[in-house]
Amino acid sequence: MTTVNIGIVAHVDAGKTSLTERILFETHVIDATGRVDQGNTQTDSLDLEKRRGITIKASVVSFFIQDKTLDKTLKINLIDTPGHADFIAEVERSFSVLDAAILVISAVEGIQAQTKFLMSLLTRLGIPTIIFINKIDRSGAQSHTLIKHIKEKLAESVLPLYTPEDLGTKQAFIVENSFSYAKNPAFMEECIGLLALNDEAFLEAYVNEEQVAEKQVKEALKRQVRDARLYPIFFGSAMTGIGVAELLAGVATFFSENPRSEDGPLSGVVFKIEKEASGEKIAYVRIFSGSLHVREYVPVSRKISESEVETHTDKVKKLHVFWEGKMLQSSSVEAGEFCKVWGLKDIKIGDVVGEWSDSIKDLHFVAPQMEARIEARHQEQSHRLYQALLELSEEDPLVKVLQDTFHHEIYLRLFGEVQKEVIETMLQENYGLDVQFSETRVVCIEKPAGTGQALEEMGKGGNPFYATVGFRVEPAPPGSGISYRLEVKLGALPLAFHRAIEETVYETLQQGLYGWEVTDIVVIVTHTGYSSPVSTAADFRNLVPLVVMEALSQAGTGVYEPLNQFELSAPAHVISQAMFRLSALKASVERPILRGETFLLAGTLPVATTEEFKRSLHSFTEGEGIFLTKPSGFRKIEDAFPTRKRADFNPLNRKDYMLHILHTY
């Protein structure tokens, strides 16, 4: 039996979860379909998901379909993913374990910014995708115009395999486009023209106006869909079931022969983590090759850096596989499957179970660029709040928790306001914690403006520590982070002292002259010295912040704000208004490109003003604007810039710093 892992992805309100419900009904997994607005769907299991009517956590459910062409049964593991941009990290993690995808687009709302982002990610990862145009029975549904927009904004190589009739009415239905020269010559010509773009034999036949056998056309279509070079379009309505049987037939046709490496040693990846009431972690694992068995010891690996991998061994206590809407306990799990694993204690999302393999996609997630202070309304719950946030961050590693022990404050790095509301509700319902947030702000960085040098010698200049340290700091190329180098001999100090110096340099640069993290900097150790046997690692840990910050003060730093690269598509008559609004929000705009009655505008915009523009987009473009953004580095703030209060005894203030250190030393 072949197992295929498919994700359903879409923008908010496209009908993604409703389509999942209808598929489960059509495949006899459930007896009646639930409704998102009534909170009784199969895959939105969290109470919060049911109340808000949105998907927050990716969920897995399985069903079986028949591939009539090959006369075999397919097991489908289906992931229903979040649609809101604030939970895009959950979507990206799901993509890393998919064999194929169904991209849902509403026939009424059309392409949204999130649709375009999802399609670009699917394309980049080479995931075979079927496009399902939903809600064809709703008033305002589009067909020809929407397909035109799909070709312009998502992918040129798309082919509608059905035609919707009585669009926008309750009587809407679909008609299959026949692969017959006699019955549908226009469709066959379109099909062969598309196939010719990626197939030389078809191109030659197309140029020479030769007729290609219908069977050859179908086989080439299957091949190109499986290779993610062509995307078939289906139509229907998840609410009424129109077109869903045809969609499932398409899944069987195009995805049943998806190649995978089943031979070889065990190789799998953790893509989701849950916790039982007891606190035990349950890992969701995709097995790419080999097999996993109960009671066996398996290696678990984690990338610490680009060059360092940490590995430990755990014993598998229990395994569950997904089976027709339920979970069944199993003694083993084979390649190609999703499973739930108990017994992997120190586990995180992205960890590799078994060996690393080429099938494991190395996704580089963009870190959140906003933060907000969070506090318990009842001060005595502050420690419980911190522990609860650490648990939530294990389930979503991009929810970064920062504890300011100096001011007794906790900060969260976030993607947006909806995520903040969801975290607040989860803390209330799962942990009984009432919390409040400060206003969300963007996270800036600092970079050195020039070169600076500082030296503290043992026994000189009021240095009370049994240590000598000197540093030179210099600017480094954008995106290079912190480069740490030695101009002293490694053997001149005990290794423990070298380690103390390096670790403290990285800790100190978490806060620059204005409180922001310092990056794109080269730190060079120019001098070291110690006195045996009195010097300790603590001498170096206490001295290094003073020397690093003195060198940084000499160099000076600039404060840089995060930018988004944007792409705006909107009706031509609002171009002047769009450019005026973007200019007022400090955007850098390229020359607009006019395509028919639509213009395309690209450029960069500060993250701090991006949400403001998004909020105004719907009104001034009359709902027709599509605004797509992605992180695009940082830009120096030339005028007044924000500062961040320090979370330590400021080494820039030598007197206060020394008073604290010597008091606790």
Image (cartoon, helix red, strand yellow):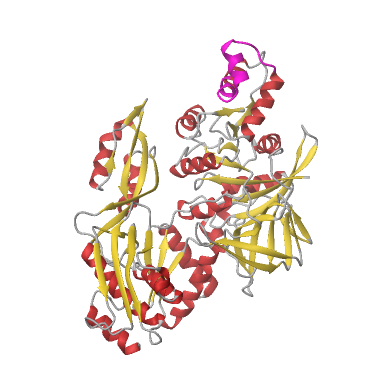
Left-right relation of 162 to 427 = right
Residue projecting furthest to the left: 639
In this rendering, does residue 132 appear at all? yes
Q: Is residue 447 above or below residue 95?
A: below
Left-right relation of 175 to 642 = right
Q: Is residue 335 above or below residue 540?
A: above
Residue projecting furthest to the bottom: 663
Q: Quadrant of residue 536?
A: bottom left
Q: Residue at x 64, y 36 (%)?
A: 242
User: Which quadrant does the N terminus fall into?
Assistant: top right
Total marks shown come to: 0
Would residue 566 be counted in the magenta stretch? no
In this rendering, does residue 645 appear at all? no
Q: Position of residue 229 (x, y in %)?
A: 57, 32
Q: Is residue 587 above or below residue 535?
A: above
User: Which quadrant does the C terminus fall into?
Assistant: bottom left
Q: Residue at x 41, y 63 (%)?
A: 413
Would residue 204 be counted in the magenta stretch? yes
Q: Quadrant of residue 647?
A: bottom left
Q: Position of residue 528 (x, y in %)?
A: 34, 73
Q: Nearer the viewer, residue 120 or 20?
A: 120
Q: Position of residue 521 (x, y in %)?
A: 32, 59
Q: Quadrant of residue 471?
A: bottom left
Q: Residue at x 28, y 59 (%)?
A: 474
Q: Nearer the viewer, residue 503 or 163?
A: 503
Q: Position of residue 199 (x, y in %)?
A: 60, 23
The segment highlighted magenta reads: 193-213
Q: Nearer the viewer, residue 506 or 186?
A: 506
Q: Nearer the viewer, residue 602 or 612?
A: 602
